[in-house]
Amino acid sequence: MRIGILTAGGDCPGINAAIRGVGKTAILEYGMEVIGISSGFLGLINEEYIKLDENVLSGILTLGGTILGTSRENPFKKGSAFNAIDKPKLIRKHYSELGLDALVCIGGNGTQRTATQLSEEGLNVIGIPKTIDNDVWGTDVSFGFDSALGIASEAIDRLHSTANSHKRIMVIEVMGHHAGWLALYSGVASGGDVILIPEIEFDIDMVARCLKKRAISKKPYSIVVVAEGIPTPKGETAASYVSNNIQEMTGLETRETILGYTQRGGSPSPMDRILATRFGAFAVELIARKNFGQMVSLKGDTVTSVPLPEVGGKLRLVPVDFPLVDKARRMGVCFGEKSC
Ligand code: F6P
């Protein structure tokens, strides 16, 4: 069999481990051929390919980013009428000209949605969930999240010492798109006093009140972790909105840090290397069994799969009754709620 593999959407640590998991399993266990497709779905439109053999796959397990490159190209997005290239038709054409028996799509929500649409157009597709946001429906976790969590937690740990030296409030903005998983987990992992996530409505007055209470009880500093996706006035970052309001409402010296793309860079954590490898290997097993139209997923500690149509277009957000939120709240973490 000949399989194609592409990586699309925002990059993250672990993608190369997944490519390697697919490639080595396909080649060594099943004697398959593997074709790498450049820059996500764009590579299938523009016919940009690279043959993936053991030499190309060697040494990429620990490498950040993606050796295939990525893009946010959505072939089903309606372009302007005058240059209406039928991209899905081109993809189908190039898929069959390549002689592919299956296509593995490594990506987040948008990628899995496109994978579903291509599957509905008759291509044999397997999705693998990746994103630092951990917001792909149908899997307990996506690889990329653990690495970003480690980066964010290490950064927040560092901010404790400088906050303590200056007796300041430190506001740290982490990524996560519309989900609060990274902010919640890195905030709890690194002793955040306030954690603001899109899933829990917050009142900035309550945040200020909580921080004033801490200052009055002689806490030398406070750490405020905010998800980039919390509601803010148009054009204002989460970090600046929260830190400016804290400074104005409390008079306490406040500084902001936006971690940004550092959370997407560098070598994957060991857990992400393992998860990405497991996902890649299982994707090939699904192909060998001709069980297409599936997305690989983790349920508990079992790698399994879910039908792609169940995944596309849904977001996996932090449930408001998530046990970790309740536990943190009971330990005094402020989520900016009325009951703070
Ligand atoms: O989905 C991953 C992510 O890093 C989000 O956390 C972030 O909001 C977005 O991608 C940034 O998108 P881009 O890489 O296109 O700037």
Image (cartoon, grey):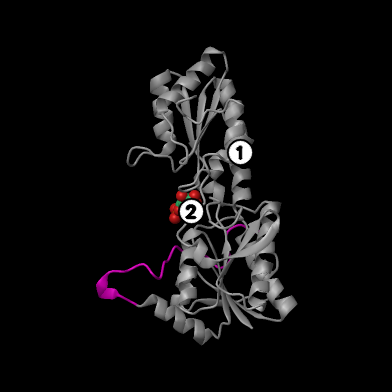
| Relative image position of residue 155 (x, y in whole percent) | 59, 38
Residue at the image point whose x is 48% and y is 17% from the top? 212
* Quarter of the figure with residue 22: bottom right
Amino acid type, mark 2: Leu
Which is the main secondary structure of the residues drawn in magenta? loop
Residue at the image point whose x is 33% and y is 37% from the top? 233
Q: Earlier in the sequence, mark 1 or mark 2?
A: 2
Inter-mark Cα distance, 1 to 2: 19 Å
| Relative image position of residue 128 (x, y in whole percent) | 58, 64
Assign a secondary structure to mark 2.
loop
Residue at the image point whose x is 25% and y is 74% from the top? 82
Residue range corresponding to the magenta coloring? 63-85
**Vertical placement of residue 220 versus 268, above or below:** above
Assign a secondary structure to mark 1.
helix
In the drawing, does residue 163 fall left or right of residue 254?
right
| Relative image position of residue 83 (x, y in whole percent) | 28, 74
Q: Which residue is mark 1?
A: 323
In the drawing, does residue 27 fall left or right of residue 223?
right
**Vertical placement of residue 226 versus 103, above or below:** above
Residue sitting farthest toward the left? 82
The answer to whether residue 260 shows anywhere in this view is: yes
Amino acid type, mark 1: Pro
Q: Residues within 10 Å of mark 2 (few under 14, many from 20)?
A: some
Residue at the image point whose x is 52% and y is 22% from the top? 168
Instruction: Determine which of the numbered discs, if any, sits on residue 315 in the image.
Output: 2
**Vertical placement of residue 143 versus 214, above or below:** below
Determine if the magenta segment contains residue 225: no
